[in-house]
Amino acid sequence: MNFLALCQRLRQEAGLSGTGPASVLSQTGEMKRVVDWIASAYEDIQNLHETWKFLRTDFSFSTIASTQDYTPAAASLTDFASWVKDDIRIYSSVEDEYFLEYYPWAIFRQAYYFGTHRTATGRPTVVTVKPNNALCLWQIPNAIFTVNGEYYKSTQTMSANADIPVLPTRFQMIIVWKGLMHYGAYAGAEEKYAHGNKEYTKLISMLEFDQLEDMTFGEPLA
């Protein structure tokens, strides 16, 4: 469903009169609230977890000789939230691609922002994420290399009638049920709120099972 269809379904589930909204744009009064509830519900669901699979996507950029730091903007990422830190690769040709070893910033700073390491140039082997979210490479690239990996997108918004949620299609009704909870809370409609909450709770469990990474366990302590 697109943004408009989601809003129309919420109006239907809430039992509001009419057949609207006819558009998500330029609404006032009750239909504007319907549009706003769907928009808020969509953002609420995305913000539940930073690591939803549906927000994970690829990046790739080329290094510049003598340039060590690469911000999301430098990598042409306009929807950036965070890097997938343990899966960053580099190559000069695809035949020699390898993984960069990731170190947390504090450890990287102690090891590679010290003494002659500060200015060492060559083929990068180590990467960190600085406090400003820039990828920082060591050694400082001495040529053009391709860096690639994955990142998590920031919270997506819908603003046009035809905008489609990034959630898998089979889970998109969760937005309507969350929106119905917003409506129920606003209107004091306890029955509508309870119905929305019941359906939302069922679908959010399914969405989390499908769209969060599998939990892994470390080695036994003894």
Image (cartoon, rainbow, N blue to C red):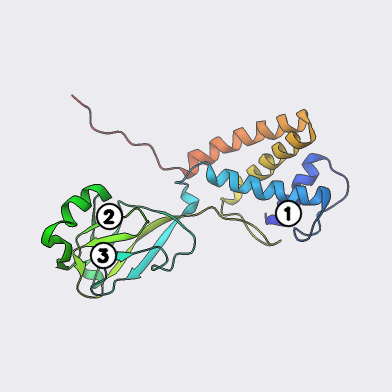
In the image: residue 19, left or right of residue 165:
right
**Identity of the amino acid at label 3?**
Ile
User: How far is mark 1 from mark 2, CA to CA?
Assistant: 43 Å
Report the residue marked by disc 2. 128
Tell me where residue 70 sits by quadrant: bottom left
Eyeballing the image, is 112 above or below 121?
above
Label located before the other in sequence (1 or 2): 1
Q: Secondary structure at mark 1?
A: helix
Q: Quadrant of the C terminus?
A: top left
101 over 49 or under it: above or below: below
Residue denoted by label 1: 5
The crowd level at tag 3 (other Cα within 10 Å; few <14, some 14-19, many 20+) is: many
Q: Position of residue 65 (x, y in %)?
A: 24, 75
* Rendered residue at 42%/66% (across/down): 73
Residue toward you, 220 or 45: 45
Alpha-carbon span between mark 1 and mark 3 = 43 Å
Answer left or right for 203 relative to 134: right
Q: Residue furthest right?
A: 18
Q: Amino acid at mark 2?
A: Thr
Give the amino acid at mark 1: Ala
Find residue 125 and report its horizontal and vertical position in percent. Answer: 19, 60
